[in-house]
Image (cartoon, rainbow, N blue to C red):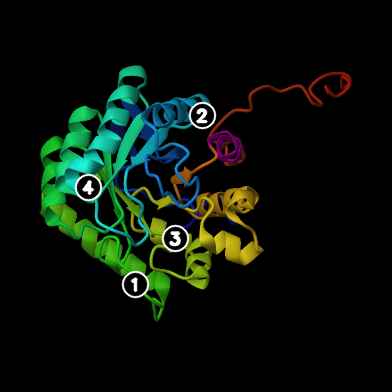
Amino acid sequence: MTETALPGIYLPTLDHPVHTFGDRKIDFDNQVALMAIINRTPDSFFDGGRTFALEAAVDACLQAVNDGADWVDIGGVPFSPGPALSAAEEAERIVPVIEAVRARSNVIISADTFLPEVAEASIKAGANVINDTTGLQNKDLAAVVAASGAHLVITHSLAAPRTVYPRPQYNDVVVEITDFLRRKVDLAVELGIAPEKIVIDPGHDLNKNTLHSLEITRRFQEIAALGFPALAAVSNKDFIGETLDQPKKDRLSGSLAAAVMCIMNGARIVRMHNAAEANSAVRFTEAALGWREPAYLKHNMGEFNEPAQP
């Protein structure tokens, strides 16, 4: 790991810090990208189908952009076990959302899919990124991404798509995740994806128990040390609920704490449901790291302090 110039903060050395997504650029050496989550599913684990309708999904994407999101992640199939959805059905869910959002915004758009056919249709519709939660189990997906020049998020998980993986066991969860991601990055490059188009995600809660996910959060710098922008997908997940004894609707504070902890340990993308609140947490953290100027300076900047505004 590289040494940090700031005590208690890990600043990873990225092989390719500046990433281009369409006409947007992110310099991950001094920026954190806020990824908002939009699920066009009737059974999403958090919102239970609130954004399943097309118009609701599009409105949610645009509201997230207004709330400060740099990136929207649009999915049509949950990670959790369940019946398979055909490529045609999945594309029917997410492609119209991607098209509508792209027509109205230059926000970074990722399609959360592991199917090559859905990935290809999503990229044609305007997606910049394919977010593959299966860790590139289907090599044909890499061919689609490589041919298009899109980005790929490589996520650690163990189960075959939509299947049960009971009682996951690790000797050292972070070491094993790091090894998995290193091998999958090598495979992606071998299959034609440029290194500057790769993002990595340790996959909090994906085939991990709460103790595993807490360990990932505590040792996130070992993930970030791989040299690729690292994504922390912590929002409202079960490890937060089990740690704090909270139902999904009450996990915002824990989600923000986990996201900030990951940022301080090298995460450069955070995937969050509550875009407005997450934007405040992310931008404050950037300012504290010296990457962003405060919105204004007034307190103790003059001869006397004006009364606090209500």
User: Looking at the image, do the residues carrying marks 2 and 4 touch, with CB atoms under 8 Å apart?
Assistant: no
Q: Nearer the viewer, residue 102 or 81?
A: 81
Residue type at the position of mark 4: Pro
Residues in magenta?
275-283
The residue tagged 1 is: 165
Q: Nearer the viewer, residue 247 or 258?
A: 247
User: Looking at the image, do the residues carrying marks 4 and 1 touch, with CB atoms under 8 Å apart?
Assistant: no
Query: Which numbered mark, 3 or 1, is in the foreground of this view?
Result: 1
Q: Can I make out residue 68 in this image?
A: yes
Residue type at the position of mark 3: His
Whichever of callouts 2 and 3 sits on the residue coming sooner in the sequence is 2
The residue tagged 2 is: 68
Whichever of callouts 2 and 1 sits on the residue coming sooner in the sequence is 2
Between the C-alphas of marks 4 and 1, the distance is 30 Å
Dot 2: few (<14), some (14–19), or many (≥20) neighbours within 10 Å?
Answer: many
The residue tagged 4 is: 195
Between the C-alphas of marks 2 and 4, the distance is 27 Å
The residue tagged 3 is: 204
Q: Residue 307's x, y, as percent?
A: 89, 21
